[in-house]
Structures are given as C-alpha cells and as structure tokens.
Image (spheres, helix red, strand yellow):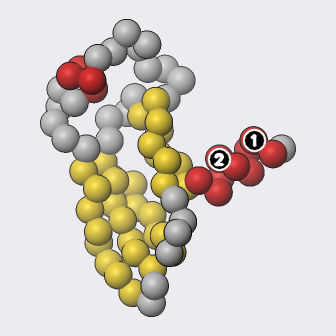
C-alpha cells in the first residue's frame, strides 16, 4: 500500500504503467478485486491516504509529474 499526504486541492494521479498490455480489458484490470483508497488520518487540513492498485498502474502525486514534464 502506498501512503500519501495531501492538502486541500492537491491531486493524485492513477494511470497505466508503461508495461501494461494495451489489449487489457477493464474486467482483467479488476480481476483481483476493487482498488482500495483508504483515509488513514485527517489532521490540520491534511489527509493521509493509503492506495492499493495493481502493479500495472502507476500512482503519483500530480506535482511530481508536472515537474518531470517541465524538465
């Protein structure tokens, strides 16, 4: 499980990894069950979130992706 902290209006992106089979169906993606997004803690305008997704998906804080695109 990946744990992240987010403030108001900060975003998390979930998208296919580079190694995903392009012919994979939604049913195959969810074959092992639902994705899990769990709120672990709320404190001082911050939320601590746990995320469980298949390895064929990538989870990233949006600001990291934007920094990579700019460089």
Do callouts 1 and 2 mark residues in contact (Cβ within 8 Å)?
Answer: yes
Residue 40: percent from the left, percent from the top? 29, 72
Residue 61 lies in quadrant? bottom right
Does 47 sit above or below residue 66?
A: below
Residue 2: percent from the left, percent from the top? 39, 54
Q: Which residue is mark 2?
A: 65
Q: Residue at the location (50% across, 75% down)? A: 8
Q: Residue furthest right?
A: 71
Q: How many marks?
A: 2
Does 40 sit above or below residue 38?
A: below
- Residue 48 shown left or right of residue 35 in the figure: right
Does 28 sit above or below residue 47?
A: above
Q: Residues within 10 Å of mark 1 (few under 14, many from 20)?
A: few
Does 57 sit above or below residue 8?
A: above
| Residue placed most toward the observer, 9 or 6 | 9
Tag shown at residue 69: 1
Residue 24 lies in quadrant? top left
Q: Residue at the location (25% across, 44% down)? A: 35
SS class, disc 1: helix
- Residue 43 shown left or right of residue 68 in the figure: left
């Amino acid at each position: 499980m990946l744990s992240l902290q987010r403030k108001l209006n900060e975003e998390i992106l979930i998208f296919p990894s580079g190694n995903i089979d392009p012919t994979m169906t939604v049913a195959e993606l969810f074959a092992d069950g639902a994705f899990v997004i769990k709120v672990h803690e709320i404190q001082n305008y911050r939320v601590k979130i746990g995320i469980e997704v298949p390895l064929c998906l990538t989870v990233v804080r949006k600001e990291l992706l934007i920094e990579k695109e700019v460089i």
